[in-house]
Image (cartoon, helix red, strand yellow):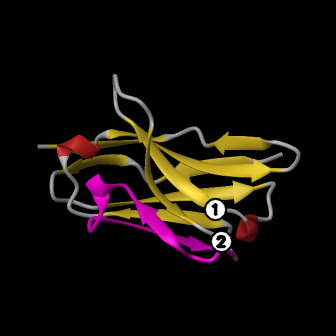
Amino acid sequence: QVRLVESGGGLVQAGGSLRLSCAASGIVFSMYTMAWYRQAPGKQRELVASITRGGDTNYADSVKGRFSVSRDNAEKTVYLQMDSLKPEDTAVYYCNTRVIVTMAIDYWGQGTQVTVSS
């Protein structure tokens, strides 16, 4: 059973930093792309950053230069370092992976709240 557990969210002032973690189990972690999404109240869930099994990264334009995604395959954990946070970064942040066997299945964590005060 695939399980993703996020941690590290909280309340921070604008300009501050947070580091989110997502611990995975039930998958061969090193084989899969891992991603971070976020959803603000009244908005659709959006992709924030992703990292392939080879370490290639991709970022939403809104976070480029401020956020950094990394992974530790030995610890089966993916991280999202968030610097220079802005109030518009306030959202619930979700960890995601997509497993393809006979069909594609998206797995999600429970989410962690990030609130940036102005």
Q: Residues in magenta?
A: 53-73
Q: Secondary structure at mark 1?
A: loop
- Residue beneath the point at 16% across and 58% down: 15
Decide: marks 2, 1 in contact (CB < 8 A)?
yes
Q: Which x, y percent locates residue 29?
A: 73, 65
Q: Which x, y percent locates residue 91?
A: 35, 38
Image height of 26 relative to 30, above or below: above
- Residue beneath the point at 24% across and 50% down: 12
Q: Quadrant of the C terminus?
A: top left
Please report whichever mark, 2 or 1, sits nearer to the chain's N-terminal start.
Answer: 1
Q: Is residue 23 left or right of residue 44?
A: right
- Residue 33 is marked as 1
- Residue beneath the point at 27% across and 61% down: 17
| Quadrant assignment, res 113 | top left
| Quadrant assignment, res 72 | bottom right
Q: Nearer the viewer, residue 55 or 13?
A: 55
Q: Is residue 26 left or right of residue 21?
A: right
Outermost residue on the top side: it is 42
| 57 inside magenta stretch | yes
Q: Secondary structure at mark 2?
A: loop
Q: Is residue 8 left or right of residue 1?
A: left
User: Which kind of residue does numbered mark 1 sit on?
Assistant: Thr
On the image, numbered disc 2 is attached to which residue?
Answer: 53
- Residue beneath the point at 75% across and 41% down: 105
How far apart, in angstroms, are the residues tagged by discs 2 and 1? 5 Å
How many residues crowd around disc 2 within 10 Å: few (fewer than 14), some, or many (20 or more)?
Answer: some
Q: Quadrant of the N terminus?
A: top right
